[in-house]
Amino acid sequence: MRVLEQTPDRLVLEVRPIALMVMCVGLFLLFLVLGFGSSVLLPGFLALMGVQVPGIADVSIPGTNILGYAAVIPLAVGVFALKARRLTLDRRAGMVTLTSRGVFGTSKQSWPLGEFRGASLRRNSRAGNNSRTYTPMLEFSQQSVPVFPYGTSGSGPARLVEAVNAWFGPQANTITREGDMAAEVTAALAKLGIRPPR
């Protein structure tokens, strides 16, 4: 996450999935080398070095070609699914805008800043190595919107949530008196004899 602009009136954050892109390219190269290495790449590489090994072109390991063709999958995910996202909170315009930029162009979603309640972290299912992944969520009065559609580990999601809530101010993550849940909270407080401030 990078902070592109931070003023009292405007906050612009950008999230680029560079680590995921590097991982996808690395998997593509690994599958490509393992899949076609024994029958195509290895003889060509040895020929470039001037090494003559009789019968090397006839060497094939069963099933490796399938692995070579499967190299297209991580490359396709990296190119077509991973997108840079820019989150803009603008007090003057009164808008929260989430812009996604990828190979197929740019898409933009906007919501009124008046409906924004702050950002939160959604904990995703447990990963195989007992670590957890998190997705930063934009909380509005009627809906929750993920900043990106996948969970990541590390401090990135928490830093994004902290930056948004610090800019948004003390009204972040407060209970509003709108909607069904707020009515339930108000009723529960009333049963305890607590009157919420108006």
Image: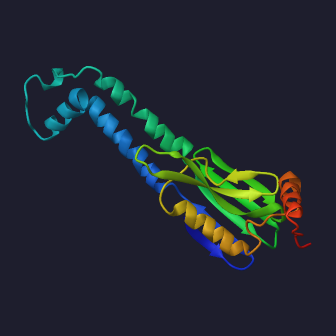
Q: In the image shown, does 116 or 90 lie closer to the viewer?
A: 116
Q: On the rendered image, what quadrant is the N terminus found in? A: bottom right
Q: Is 6 situated above or below 17?
A: below
How many numbered dots are placed on residues in this image?
0
Q: On the rendered image, what quadrant is the C terminus found in? A: bottom right
Q: What residue appears at the point 25 percent right and 19 percent down from the top-left corner?
A: 62
The answer to which quarter of the image holds residue 188 is bottom right
The answer to which quarter of the image holds residue 94 is bottom right
- Colouring mode (rainbow / by chain / secondary structure / one colour): rainbow
Q: What residue appears at the point 51 percent right and 43 percent down from the top-left corner?
A: 79
Q: Is 93 situated above or below 63?
A: below
Q: Is 91 situated above or below 58?
A: below
**Residue 20 percent location from the top left of the image:** 46, 50
The answer to which quarter of the image holds residue 4 is bottom right
Q: What residue appears at the point 71 percent right and 52 percent down from the top-left corner?
A: 145
> As drawn, is 95 to the left or to the right of 53?
right
Q: As drawn, which residue projects farthest toward the bottom? A: 8
**Residue 21 percent location from the top left of the image:** 46, 50
> As drawn, is 41 to the left or to the right of 118?
left
Q: In the image shown, does 157 or 176 lie closer to the viewer?
A: 176
**Residue 70 percent location from the top left of the image:** 40, 30
> As drawn, is 81 to the left or to the right of 93?
left
Q: In the image shown, does 143 or 21 lie closer to the viewer?
A: 143
Q: As drawn, which residue projects farthest toward the right? A: 198
Q: What residue appears at the point 69 percent right and 74 percent down from the top-left corner?
A: 167
